[in-house]
Amino acid sequence: MSLPQTVEVVILGRKFNIKTDRDPDYVRKLAQKLEEMIEKIKSGNSRITFDKAMVVACFYLLDENESLKKQIFELGEEIKRLEEGAKLLIKPNNKIAP
């Protein structure tokens, strides 16, 4: 892990200094994606403020994160079930059961 550094990003003309140990280009790409998301939110309602659009974007991202965590957990459970099923098919002497 590298030492933390400050990366300046600009989102809709606003500058933010992000302290991170991630690659600066990666952080800038994340900021670009966030900016695109905020622009999309704002395009649906021209009166929405930057701050409100940022909060809405955060909720979208948190929802996506929670959904992905649930999917990962469910996939892990499916892998466990498949491993248990595979164990039943293989005999102790490493021969496949008929």
Image (cartoon, helix red, strand yellow):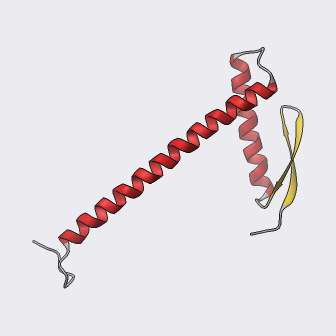
Please count the marks in the image: 0
Identified at 25% across, 67% down, the residue is 86
Give the side of residue 73 with respect to residue 9, left or right.
left
Residue that sits furthest to the left in the current view: 98
Seen from the viewer's position, the closer of residues 70 and 90 is: 70
Residue 84 x/y as whole percent: 27, 66
Residue 95 x/y as whole percent: 17, 80
Give the side of residue 79 with respect to residue 93, left or right.
right
Give the side of residue 10 with respect to residue 67, left or right.
right
Residue 82 x/y as whole percent: 29, 61
Up the image or down, 51 lies above or below 31; here it is above
Work out which quarter of the rendered image holds the N terminus and state it.
Answer: bottom right
Residue 14 x/y as whole percent: 88, 35
Identified at 79% across, 68% down, the residue is 2
Corner quadrant of residue 60: top right
Corner quadrant of residue 80: bottom left
Residue that sits furthest to the bottom in the current view: 93
Give the side of residue 47 with respect to residue 57, left or right.
right
Seen from the viewer's position, the closer of residues 19 and 30 is: 19
Work out which quarter of the rendered image holds the C terminus and state it.
Answer: bottom left
Identified at 74% across, 53% down, the residue is 26
Up the image or down, 39 lies above or below 70; here it is above
Corner quadrant of residue 44: top right
Identified at 71% across, 39% down, the residue is 33
